[in-house]
Amino acid sequence: MTVWTPVALARDIEPGTATGTTVDGDSVALWRGTDGTVHAWADRCPHRGMRLSFGFVRENRLVCLYHGWQFDGAGACRHVPAHPRMEPPKTVKPQQYRAIESAGLVWVAPTDAGGTPDVPGTAITPVRSVWIDGDRDTALSLLGLEGTGALVTGALDGTDVIAGIQTIDAHTTAVHVVAAGIVPADTVNALVHRLHEFRDSVSSVREAVAS
Ligand code: FES
C-alpha cells in the first residue's frame, strides 16, 4: 500500500466490529470502536502474529482472539489477561495505517501519506461493494467506467455513481460503489442487482474456463 485506497463502504464497518481486507497484497485489519472511530492496522498481532481481524472489539479496544491482549485506538496495549497486574509493554504495538471516512467510503493509507483523498463534495447514497475476479482494467471495463486513480465516476444504468477501486491482488479487484446524490431505495436495489450481475458474469466465465 502506497497511497490512499478505498477499502469499504463506511456503513459496512459497524461500531464494535472488526473485519479484514487486503490492499495490494497487504493484509489489513479494519475495526470501528463503539465511539465510531474507524482504525486500520496491519492484520498481525504484535504478540504472536494472530490475525487481528479475527479479534473482537470491546468498547474502544481491539482484543486479539488468541491470548486476549487488548489494544486501544492508538495501538497501545492496555491489558494482558495472563498477567493482569503487569504494566503492558509500551513498545508492543500493531503496525498502524491512517484511516478516514470520506464520500461514504473508508480509506486507508500508510502513516506517512499526506493530505486526504480527493473526493467530490456531493451527497452520496451507499450502494454496495463487490469483489470482481479480474484486475482493475477488467473491473472498470465490465462496469463501463473509466478513469485513473482510486476513485472513478460514471453512470451505471443511467444513475451517476462514484466507485472506489481497491486492488486486492493481481487477480481480484474490489469496487465500492456509492450513488451521487440522494437516490431512492428502488434505484439502490436496481444498482445492487446490476453489480451482482456484473460480478457473477466474470465468475461464470472463470468457472466455465476451468471446467
Ligand atoms: S497473538 Fe495476539 S494476544 Fe497473543
Image (spheres, rainbow, N blue to C red):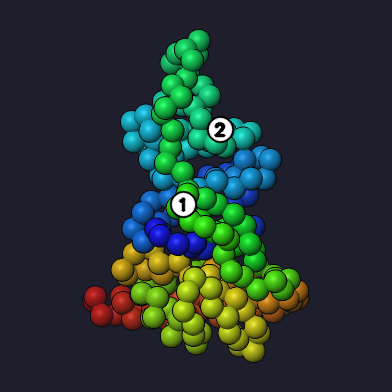
x and y percentages locating residue 81 in the rendered image: 47, 18
- Please name the residue shown 47% across and 12% down the image: 86
Residue 56 can be seen, yes or no: yes
- Neighbours of disc 2 within 10 Å: few (<14), some (14-19), many (20+): some
Disc marking residue 98: none
Q: Is mark 2 within 8 Å of ligand 1?
A: no
Residue 191 can be seen, yes or no: no
- Please name the residue shown 24% across and 75% down the image: 210
> Considering depth in this image, is 145 or 18 the residue closer to the camera?
145
Q: Is mark 1 within 8 Å of ligand 1?
A: no
Mark 1 to mark 2: distance in Å? 21 Å
Q: Earlier in the sequence, mark 1 or mark 2?
A: 2
Disc marking residue 72: 2
Amino acid type at image mark 1: Asp
- Indicate the secondary structure of the residue bearing disc 2: strand
Query: 197 left or right of 101?
Result: left
- Please name the residue shown 38% across and 51% down the image: 27
- Indicate the secondary structure of the residue bearing disc 1: loop
x and y percentages locating residue 159 in the rendered image: 66, 84
Disc marking residue 112: 1
The N terminus, quarter of image: bottom left
Q: Is residue 154 above or below residue 46?
A: below
- Neighbours of disc 1 within 10 Å: few (<14), some (14-19), many (20+): few
- Please name the residue shown 38% across and 40% down the image: 44
Q: Is residue 61 above or below residue 111?
A: above
Q: Is residue 95 above or below residue 162?
A: above
Amino acid type at image mark 2: Asp
User: Residue 179's quadrant in the figure?
Assistant: bottom right
Among all residues in the image, which is located at the extreme top? 85
Q: What number of labels is visible? A: 2
